Amino acid sequence: MNEKQIARELYSHAVVFYFCDRTGSFSFLKEHASPIDMRDGGDNPLMRAVFAACWLLRRY
């Protein structure tokens, strides 16, 4: 994984975790968002696309 892929994944996991924590909803997603497993060299292409989309929608 390159630096940008790592940043996208970390950011996406943090957004999902924070959203679920604040709303009290989607506990299954919150459980999946933590911890982040990066040992496998990255997620499948679908999840990489989701991370990239989340990254593009972020606020500065």
Image (cartoon, rainbow, N blue to C red):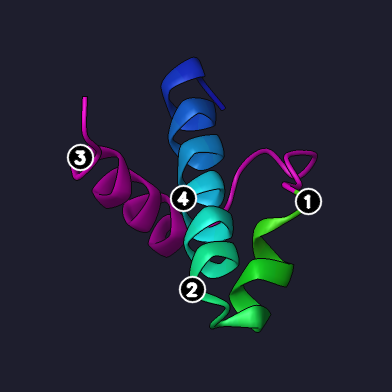
Helix or strand or loop: what does disc 4 sit on?
helix
Give the quarter of the figure containing the N terminus: top right
Q: Callout 1: 10 Å neighbours few (<14), some, many (20+)?
A: few
Q: Dot 3: within a 10 Å radius of its alpha carbon, few (fewer than 14), some, or many (20 or more) residues?
A: few
Q: Which residue position holds label 3?
A: 56
19 or 45: nearer the viewer:
19
- Quickly name the residue at label 4: 15
CA gap, disc 4 and disc 1: 13 Å
Gap in angstroms between the C-alphas marked 1 and 3: 23 Å
Q: Nearer the viewer, mark 2 or mark 4?
A: 2
Is label 4 or label 3 in front?
A: 4
Of callouts 4 and 1, the N-terminal one: 4
Query: In the image, is residue 55 above or below residue 44?
Result: above
Count neighbours of disc 4 (C-alpha within 10 A) and say few if under 14, some if 14 to 19, many if 20 or more: some
Q: Which mark is residue 35?
A: 1
Q: Which residue is mark 2?
A: 23
Comes first in the chain, label 1 or label 2: 2
Rounded to the nearest angstrom, the CA distance separating label 1 from label 2 is 19 Å
- Alpha carbons under labels 4 and 3: distance apart: 13 Å
